[in-house]
């Protein structure tokens, strides 16, 4: 993504112009308030900005189709500047002062945990639209991103079939990476393979020279690398610079979430195997329509990534729930969403799993080719089995935990 | 206690009572609470830097340490009184050790800055790499990058069920800040405080007069750290989550910026600077026209260039000039600068 | 056998990259006693200058070795005239002002380039040593670092400008009395220092993903290396980069990269505790 501030402003102005075309009355007191809380500046804004754009696009779509319950939807958004303290503050503001009807947002798991209890205490419906480590069990929250098993279950057997049984794991050293690494280990062993070593890297490590040497000492058949963020991107670059990319195949559950594959040259990125819910190269009418709308609003589609599409789909799912409930009342909307609601979004069919409030969605195995994600294989309607193993909101509706999933 | 001290205390109490009453009408108490906490954090650095001449690049380390000590012990104890006390004492103890190591090693200005910076980085890197299940203290998982959520927040001492939150928490923090402020005032008026200022002005002179400079600096450093630890614990209880970003360089930088903008060498300056800039940041998050980092940076550059003494001394001087009093004290910052140059 | 060679290369590379990232800061600090906390952002801008130049079709080596240092040097010059000039002799104030500048640059870079990771690929292919593949670019960095140190030494020791610079470094008042304007010398020094920072950023750019906040990763390391080096410019830089690079790589290979970084920091604390004015206050006294 290389969205420039000026383009963004232009797009914002365009959105404003569209908004001003609407009758004033429709915008007045009677709007439905959608709270959005994302890092659109600071170190996480590569994730946050497209999510913010997706939020605006989704709400514009809803309003263009006549709004919800005959009312227009209005966005109240705050930029948390990649600062956890601001999440707490804006969550308070959204729920107590602005009294929004729903909140979409949060990027890092830490930011979600910083605001989740506030949402719960104030009975504000909360959507977390990001790929994360799984295990959150709370009837007030809906999660529309993929969880580790949904990717790993699909990716690991495919990658091992293409390479071999000896696997080396390099993971980001935080909750997501730790849990994903354990799932990878489990699925590698289930498929008759062996994990030769697992290394963890804090998010600011950017020098992988010694690691690449260590990997060569272990000489695995496959390297699985759930590495996260800008610093970790250096690994893929240094891997290619050492000439390793033609020797040992790579797979990742995170490379590409922030459109990293467009930063690597094709010589560096080609052949990396990934598994996601969304790829810009998906050949479906919904995806084409979505990309065209995005292009009309923001100029070009390079910014679209997995999390932006999750956000779009999350808002659409919420809208579907409101329509079905016929009201904005908290419990009614939750029950409507629990009735197994689904929509067809840019990434395909996506449904809410009533047991966990997580999403059941399509997962595509892809290979990076020429800075694009070529879809190799699609698995329809994969369930979040990791969270299902620990969470049952039908039986324990008062549960309020993030479980650490025992593997 | 002499007359001016009594007057000082009375003025402090009256002004703060009015502020505590009036401010919630302008800003929500939830935001005010964190502004107060940041104010206390600013004061902690203001004390050791402005009055002790110790430039600490790692005040965030003490803030984060206080917050983590509180969070970890609150998970284990399940009640908030002991964790609060531990947060202050352990942080002060850690600072005393670190300070003794530095001051008895005769480290000064930039070298001091480097050590405090490095210690902050070490803490940050350590906490950041504790995501694995093996990092457990008692019942508390360290959580690495994601931090520790879901610990016991402040409660009425002895009754873990009676949470203090919302408006009540605001009043608790405000009163805590006033108490700390008065304690700092008392400390600075005592002979200890006057000697500390003497050390700031000329360390060799004080050593030759016969004072144990290293010991006094260590004590002052620990006191400042203890205040930062208290601010950290209050912050943890307010945010209900602690994350390694509390230790980050950015956080340390912000504390220094608060002190500069507010005015170094005053008690009020750092508090005003902290609360003011934190509120500015909160307001900036509600717009998306200009990058917020840019604005904070510009504020700092402009203050260093054009208002190097900070807001509070500048306003004070303006007030004194307009009222017609003679400016009594020499500005503290210029003297400090002379020492560095 | 192969593995020990590979580890040796990694070790030299770690030392060379420390030399590179600290050189700009060391020049400015050694000559002017100004700590430029925007140093990391100067490196970041060097990286962006390289990437932009390469995208415009400039040869990657020209972009790295010429375009980036020039661009960043000029930016440094502007910064010096606008801000730093007013703050000479006020160590703490210059630190704060440059800290503010670093935030400004991060903000500007975010507004211009967006916050997505960018980068260019390494221009030198990897090659095999026995059973191992090594990053060929590591050698390039080692060579550049060596050339840089030699060049700095030659300029300071062998040229008239170097003589004036050394004179100013020791007694700026005397240099001024002899008719050399410290103002212009400082200006030139700051230009050189910034250009060196830009060069370092440019050379490291192909190895890392670049974001506007990338600078933060370097400043602490550079700061520690320069301060621990002590008063001598080149001897301090080389000796502290060597000790830190060695310590961190030993621990990196023995345990993990994180422990390596922590080892570097712990080494810095111990070193400064033992030698409060830096390495060259005790060894290599009076050397350059």
Image (spheres, coloured by chain):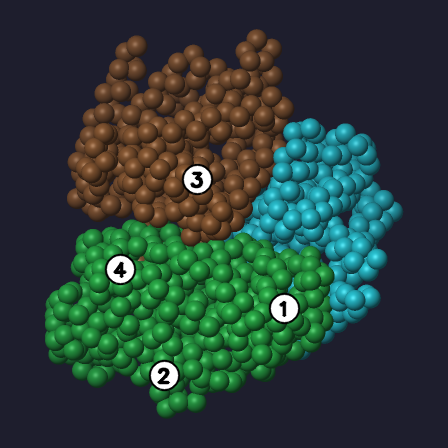
Pick the front one: C100 or B303: C100
Assign the C terminus of chain A to one quadrant of the image.
bottom left
Mark pair 1, 4: CA separation? 38 Å
Q: Position of residue B145 (x, y in %)?
A: 46, 52
- Circle 3 residue: B137
Q: Are marks 1 and 2 in contact (CB under 8 Å)?
A: no
- Counting residues from the start of the chain, the first of labels 1 and 4 encountered is 4
Q: What is the number of the mark on residue A138?
A: 4
Mark pair 1, 2: CA separation? 34 Å
Q: Are marks 1 and 3 in contact (CB under 8 Å)?
A: no
- Circle 2 residue: A348
Q: Is residue C89 left or right of residue B176?
A: right
Q: What residue appears at the point 47 percent right and 76 percent down from the top-left corner? A: A154
SS under mark 2: strand
Chain designation of label 3: B
- Chain ID, cyan in image: C
Q: Is residue A225 left or right of residue A35?
A: right
Q: Position of residue B159 (x, y in %)?
A: 21, 33
Residue C102 to residue A357: above or below: above
Task: Nearest to the eye among marks 2 and 4: give it.
Answer: 4
Task: Nearest to the eye among marks 1 and 3: give it.
Answer: 1
Residue A179 to residue A310: above or below: above
In this rendering, do the residues under marks 1 and 3 share a single chain?
Answer: no
SS under mark 4: strand
């Amino acid at each position: 993504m290389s969205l420039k501030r000026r383009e963004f402003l232009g797009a914002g102005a365009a959105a404003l112009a569209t908004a001003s075309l609407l009758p004033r009355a429709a915008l007045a007191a009677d709007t439905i308030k959608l709270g959005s809380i994302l890092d659109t500046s600071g170190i996480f804004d590569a994730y946050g900005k497209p999510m913010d754009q997706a939020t605006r696009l989704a709400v514009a779509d809803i309003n263009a189709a006549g709004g919800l319950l005959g009312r227009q939807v209005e966005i109240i958004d705050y930029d948390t500047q990649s600062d956890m303290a601001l999440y707490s503050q804006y969550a308070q503001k959204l729920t107590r002062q602005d009294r929004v009807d729903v909140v979409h947002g949060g990027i890092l798991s830490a930011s979600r945990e910083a605001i989740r209890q506030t949402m719960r205490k104030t009975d504000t419906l909360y959507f977390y639209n990001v790929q994360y480590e799984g295990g959150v069990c709370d009837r007030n929250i809906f999660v529309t991103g993929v969880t580790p098993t949904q990717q790993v279950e699909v990716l690991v057997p495919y990658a091992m079939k293409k390479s071999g049984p000896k696997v080396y794991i390099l993971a980001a050293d935080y909750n997501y990476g730790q849990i994903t690494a354990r799932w990878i280990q489990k699925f590698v062993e289930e498929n008759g393979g062996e994990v030769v070593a697992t290394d963890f890297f804090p998010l600011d490590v950017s020098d992988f020279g010694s690691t690449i040497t260590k990997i060569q000492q272990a000489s695995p058949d496959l390297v699985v690398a759930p590495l996260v963020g800008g610093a970790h991107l250096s690994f893929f670059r240094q891997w290619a610079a050492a000439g390793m990319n033609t020797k040992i195949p790579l797979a990742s559950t995170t490379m590409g979430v922030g459109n990293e594959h467009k930063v690597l040259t094709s010589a560096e990125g080609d052949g990396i195997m990934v598994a996601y819910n969304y790829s810009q190269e998906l050949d479906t009418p919904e995806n084409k329509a979505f990309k065209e709308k995005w292009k009309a609003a923001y100029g070009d589609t390079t910014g679209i990534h997995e999390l932006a599409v999750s956000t779009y789909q999350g808002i659409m799912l919420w809208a579907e729930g409101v329509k079905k409930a016929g009201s904005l009342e908290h419990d009614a909307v939750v029950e409507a969403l629990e009735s197994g609601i689904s929509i067809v979004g840019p990434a395909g069919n996506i449904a809410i799993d009533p047991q966990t409030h997580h999403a059941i969605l399509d997962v595509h195995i892809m290979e990076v080719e020429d800075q694009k994600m070529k879809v190799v294989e699609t698995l329809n309607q994969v369930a979040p089995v990791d969270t299902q193993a620990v969470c049952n909101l039908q039986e324990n509706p008062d549960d309020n935990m993030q479980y650490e999933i025992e593997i | 206690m002499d007359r001016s001290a009594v007057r000082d205390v009375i003025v402090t109490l009256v002004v703060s009572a009015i502020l505590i009453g009036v401010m919630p009408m302008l800003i929500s108490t939830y935001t005010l609470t964190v502004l107060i906490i940041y104010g206390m954090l600013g004061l902690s650095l203001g004390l050791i830097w402005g009055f002790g001449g110790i430039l600490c690049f790692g005040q965030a380390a003490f803030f984060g340490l206080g917050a983590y000590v509180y969070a970890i012990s609150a998970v284990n104890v399940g009640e908030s009184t002991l964790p609060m006390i531990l947060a202050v004492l352990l942080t002060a103890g850690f600072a005393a050790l670190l300070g003794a190591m530095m001051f008895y090693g005769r480290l000064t200005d930039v070298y001091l800055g480097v050590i405090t910076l490095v210690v902050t980085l070490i803490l940050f890197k350590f906490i950041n790499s504790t995501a694995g299940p093996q990092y457990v203290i008692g019942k508390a998982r360290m959580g690495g990058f994601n931090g520790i959520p879901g610990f016991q927040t402040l409660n009425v001492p002895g009754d873990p069920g009676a949470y203090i939150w919302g408006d009540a928490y605001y009043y608790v923090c405000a009163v805590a800040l006033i108490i700390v402020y008065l304690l700092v005032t008392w400390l600075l008026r005592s002979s200890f405080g006057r000697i500390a200022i003497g050390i700031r002005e000329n360390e060799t002179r004080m050593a030759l007069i016969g004072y144990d400079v290293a010991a006094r600096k260590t004590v002052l450093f620990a006191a400042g750290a203890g205040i930062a630890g208290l601010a950290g614990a209050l912050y943890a209880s307010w945010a209900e989550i602690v994350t390694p970003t509390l230790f980050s360089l950015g956080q340390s930088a912000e504390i220094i910026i608060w002190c500069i903008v507010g005015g170094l060498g005053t008690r009020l300056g750092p508090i005003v600077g902290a609360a003011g800039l934190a509120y500015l940041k909160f307001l900036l998050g509600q717009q998306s026209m200009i990058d917020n980092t840019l604005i904070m940076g510009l504020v700092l550059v402009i203050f260093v260039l054009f208002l190097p003494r900070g807001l509070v001394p500048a306003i004070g001087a303006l007030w004194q000039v307009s009222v017609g009093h003679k400016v009594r004290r020499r500005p503290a910052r210029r003297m400090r600068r002379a020492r560095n140059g | 056998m192969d593995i020990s060679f590979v580890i040796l290369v990694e070790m030299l590379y770690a030392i060379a990259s420390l030399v590179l990232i600290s050189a700009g800061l060391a020049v400015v600090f050694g000559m002017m006693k100004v700590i430029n906390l925007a140093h990391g952002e100067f490196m970041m801008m060097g990286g962006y200058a390289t990437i932009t130049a390469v995208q415009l079709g400039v040869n990657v080596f020209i972009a790295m070795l010429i375009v980036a240092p020039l661009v960043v040097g000029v930016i440094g010059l502007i910064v010096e005239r606008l801000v730093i000039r007013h703050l000479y002799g006020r160590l703490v104030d210059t630190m704060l002002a440059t800290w503010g500048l670093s935030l400004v640059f991060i903000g500007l870079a975010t507004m211009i380039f967006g916050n997505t990771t960018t980068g260019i690929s390494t221009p030198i292919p990897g090659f095999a040593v026995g059973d191992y593949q090594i990053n060929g670019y590591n050698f390039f960095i080692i060579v550049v670092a060596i050339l840089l140190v030699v060049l700095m030494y030659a300029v300071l020791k062998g040229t008239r400008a170097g003589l004036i610079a050394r004179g100013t470094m020791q007694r700026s008042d005397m240099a001024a009395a002899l008719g050399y304007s410290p103002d212009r010398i400082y200006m030139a020094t700051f230009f050189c220092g910034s250009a060196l920072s830009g060069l370092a950023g440019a050379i490291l750019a192909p190895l890392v993903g670049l974001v506007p906040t990338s600078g933060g990763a370097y400043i602490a390391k550079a700061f520690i290396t320069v301060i621990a080096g002590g008063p001598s410019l080149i001897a301090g830089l080389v000796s502290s980069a060597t000790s830190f690079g060695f310590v961190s790589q030993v621990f990196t290979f023995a345990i993990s990269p994180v422990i390596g970084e922590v080892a570097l920091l712990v080494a810095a604390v111990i070193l400064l505790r033992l030698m409060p004015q830096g390495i060259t206050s005790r060894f290599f006294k009076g050397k350059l």
